[in-house]
Image (tube, rainbow, N blue to C red):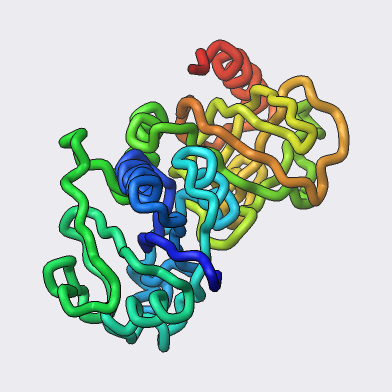
Amino acid sequence: MSGVRYIATAGMFDGVHRGHQFVLRSLADEARKRGLEPVVFTFEPHPMAIVAPDKAPQLLTSPARREELIKSLTGVQRVETIEATAEFLARDARSFLCEIHGRCGVDVFLMGFNNHIGSDRAVATDLAEAPVEVRELLPFPDGRDVSSSAVRRAIAASDFAGAETLMGHKWLYDGIVVHGHQLGRTIGFPTANIEPAVPGLLLPPAGVYAVDVRLPDGREHRGMANIGTRPTVSGHGTTFEVNIFGFEGNLYGSPVEVRFLKRLRAERPFGSLEELKAQLEADRRQAKAVACK
């Protein structure tokens, strides 16, 4: 990054929700005014996974999705990922600012309103003696609780429309199709068994959902998803599987994007496979009828 001078901000930016976008667009605007290049520093893994693993949140977005959203939604094209090691997280704010100034050419550092950085949890007013100019933004003008935690709460309540309103874009689950037990195809409902593209991605609660699935070739299909233990067929452990309407083919090892649209019902056991099949037929009709904005 030598030879170019930068204005930077730093954060996890999980979900790249509307509050994040306000900060990042402010970064891009300030960069244009000052003749600097904007750069975003983000972290992998989530810092809480290092300092308090039992309190670490599940992630709304994979690192790749996060970077893609930052670039496409805010116009900031330089995203630097910092490895969140215990050693790095033990550093205070001034030490971090000294490093990005000396090694990365950062002259101005932008902080969100009432935000803090470093192991000392410094706010902007604590950093007047830092080697870079530190500027704090005004509050996000929306006035609502727009945060990654609020988005997670909406998803936990299966309020996907609410989550996407907070985010300002579609919430997409990045998965990989893996081999399963192929029990669904025996009753006419073949499913793609999906694992997260990276560990720790958030899933909604157990239940049956209407979803849209984007395949590697870019085509989108409606489908219905089941998250749970498949009690009717004596399943063990939680699985995430999707019956993709109108698709026949081999997706093993392929990446897919799943958009959750609506929770159809809770997962429950049935007295026979025939009862399960009848319910799945009803679920499919309901999933097809869900409107998608």
Q: Residue furthest right?
A: 249
Q: Quadrant of the N terminus?
A: bottom right
Instruction: Tell me residue 179's x, y (percent).
Output: 79, 51
Q: Is residue 264 above or below residue 194?
A: above
Residue 151 appearing in the image: no
User: Toward the viewer: 115 or 258?
Assistant: 115
Q: Is residue 135 above or below residue 247?
A: below
Q: Total of numbered circles in the picture?
A: 0
Q: Quadrant of residue 102?
A: bottom left
User: Toward the viewer: 201 or 126?
Assistant: 126
Instruction: Tell me residue 143's x, y (percent).
Output: 16, 36
| Left or right of 283 in this view: 35 | left
Residue 87 appearing in the image: yes
Q: Quadrant of residue 107?
A: bottom left
Q: Is residue 246 above or below residue 179?
A: above
Instruction: Tell me residue 85's x, y (percent).
Output: 46, 82
| Left or right of 127 in this view: 48 | right
Q: Residue at x 65, y 18 (%)?
A: 281
User: Toward the viewer: 23 or 241?
Assistant: 23
Q: Residue at x 60, y 59 (%)?
A: 198
Instruction: Tell me residue 280's x, y (percent).
Output: 63, 24
Q: Residue furthest left?
A: 125
User: Toward the viewer: 149 or 27?
Assistant: 27
Q: Residue at x 58, y 21 (%)?
A: 283
Q: Residue at x 34, y 81 (%)?
A: 98
